Image (tube, rainbow, N blue to C red):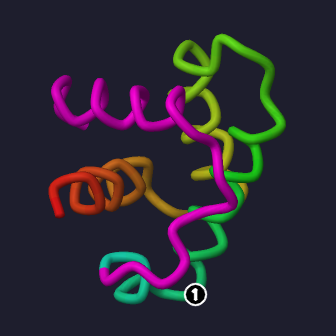
Amino acid sequence: MSDLSFKKFTRQLNERRYIGPQGTVEYNKLSPKMRDAINDIYSMVNKAADPIVSKIEGIIRAVSRKHGVSTYDIEDYFDNELIK
C-alpha cells in the first residue's frame, strides 16, 4: 500500500468508524471471499481500542490468513476505494 494512501486510509478510520463500504462500486466488484475479508477488517477495526493506526497492518495480515486472500489484494482494494 502506498504511504500516501495508507495515511489517507488511517485518517478515514480515525475520523469515523462504520460497518463497511457495502454498496460502493469497488466493493461490488469484489468476489464473495474478498467481501467477507473486507467486512471482517471493518468489524475488527470497530472492536479495536485506540490508537487504531498502529493495529491496521496486523488486522490486514490476520484477515488475509483467515480468508486465504492476499494482503496485496486487500491493500489494493483500499487504494482503489480511497482514490474514487
Residue 8 relative to residue 23: left or right = left
Q: Position of residue 13 (x, y in %)?
A: 52, 35
Question: In this rendering, is residue 56 above or below 83?
Answer: above
Quadrant housing residue 44: top right
Magenta-colored stretch includes residue 45: no
Local packing at callout 1 (Cα closer than 10 Å; few below 14, some 14-19, many 20+) is few
**Quarter of the image where the N terminus is located:** top left
Residue 10 relative to residue 43: left or right = left
Magenta-colored stretch includes residue 6: yes
Q: Position of residue 29 (x, y in %)?
A: 35, 87
**Quarter of the image where the C terminus is located:** bottom left
The answer to which of 8 and 6 lies nearer the viewer is 8
Start-end of magenta stretch:
1-25
Which residue is located at x 75 percent, y 41 percent? 46
Q: Which residue is mark 1?
A: 32
As shown in the figure, which amino acid type bears the numbered disc 1? Pro
